[in-house]
Image (spheres, rainbow, N blue to C red):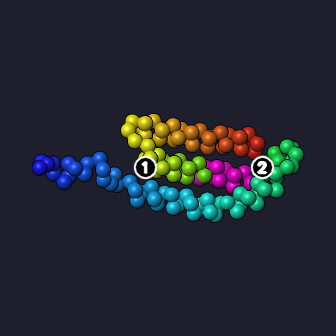
Amino acid sequence: MSYLTDLKRAVGHGSAREGTRRHWAMTKSSVALLILLPFFVFTFGPMLGQPHAEVVAYFARPFPAIVAGLFIVVGFMHFKTGIQMVIEDYVHGTMREYVVILTTCLSYGAAAVGLFALAKIAL
């Protein structure tokens, strides 16, 4: 016979009250990426295989630079939230916190590098 209450048995196994917020964040970023993807493809695609000077001149214009910057930021934040959910489902123990911190730093770092490269080209 167990003397644990239902609450004591559920602690650590139930809802953390963050599922709805994360689901909503993933939904919003998915819709934003769905809207940004055609813009990104039609601004980035024509520059594939072009000379460096032409690409730099093209991305110095505001519209292609803004589209690329938004795509970088929204894409890496979507990646951060999605990979965090996967890690929380499949990695256990203290390794979970380390891997979540590592992937969060990786996504912020990659977004920062992408924005820095874009700013270097655009300015």
Q: How many marks?
A: 2
Give the residue at x 61% y 59%.
33
Q: Is residue 94 left or right of residue 10?
A: right
Q: Which residue is mark 1?
A: 89
The mark closer to the camera, 2 or 1, is 1
| Disc 2 packing (10 Å; few <14; some 14–19; many ≥20) | many
**Secondary element type, mark 1:** helix
Give the residue at x 65% y 53%.
71
Up-down relation of residue 103 to residue 41 (above or below): above
Q: CA distance from mark 2 to mark 1?
A: 40 Å
Q: Which residue is mark 2?
A: 59
Determine the main secondary structure of the stretch shown in magenta: helix
Q: Is residue 78 left or right of residue 93?
A: right
What amino acid is labelled 1 in the image? Answer: Asp
Q: Position of residue 72 (x, y in %)?
A: 64, 49
Quarter of the image holding residue 21?
A: bottom left
Residue extent of the magenta highlight: 63-74
Up-down relation of residue 98 to residue 71 (above or below): above
What amino acid is labelled 2 in the image? Answer: Phe
Give the residue at x 73% y 39%.
120
Q: Position of residue 67 (x, y in %)?
A: 69, 55
Quarter of the image holding residue 114?
A: top right
